[in-house]
Image: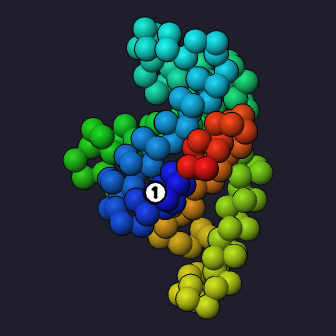
Amino acid sequence: MDDADLLIEELNREDDLGAVVRSHIRLEQLLIKFVESRIQKPSSLKRLSLDYDGYVALALALGLKADLGPLLNALGSLRNKFAHTLLAALDSQAAKDLYSALPSEDKVMVRHTYAAFRARPANSWAPEKFSDLAPSDRFKFIAMAVWVSLERELPQQSQEKASGA
């Protein structure tokens, strides 16, 4: 089972807290792989004691697509909300804010993925519009889109490692 499959499994079995925190951990690991793939001595990163925001800033400075910055920051803020608020829940506004932070091409990916999902007979329960899905279900589609976007940014060798190939 590769890391993307593990993310899907975790998203499907977790409550909102688990889905947000675990997906953030997995996405942060991809972000770190991106940074490590762009520097000469990845082992020197430990001395910098970077937090998530530091990795986002460094990744952007090293060439990560700039339109991923607002999305990664929004995910970090959501994770912090869940880490520091006892009764945090994925509400409609949180899902809407994350979707709004998606780069245009990722919004298209989410819409196409949702349309393919909805076209399966087993998913006939799903509402016609993505925006009518429960916030936790919208989060799952968005988290997977972020995964795909970050994985695309990795050099081919790192992509094979990230997917377990």
Q: Residue 13 or 6: which is nearer the viewer?
A: 6
Q: Residue 47 or 66: which is nearer the viewer?
A: 47
Work out whether 70 lies above or below 165. Answer: above
Disc 1, SS: helix
* Residue at horizontal 33 percent and vertical 45 percent from the top: 82
Where's residue 124, x and y in %? 58, 89
131 horizontally vs 105: left or right:
left
Dot 1 crowding, Cα within 10 Å, few <14, some 14–19, many 20+:
few
What residue is disc 1 on?
6
Which amino acid is tagged 1? Leu
Work out whether 143 lies above or below 129. Answer: above
Where's residue 37, x and y in %? 64, 25
Where's residue 48, x and y in %? 45, 10
* Residue at horizontal 52 percent and vertical 54 percent from the top: 2
Q: Residue furthest front?
A: 165
10 horizontally vs 45: left or right:
left
* Residue at horizontal 27 percent and vertical 38 percent from the top: 84
Instruction: Say if residue 99 shows up in the picture.
Output: no
Q: Residue 5 or 135: which is nearer the viewer?
A: 5
Q: Residue furthest left?
A: 86
Where's residue 51, x and y in %? 43, 22
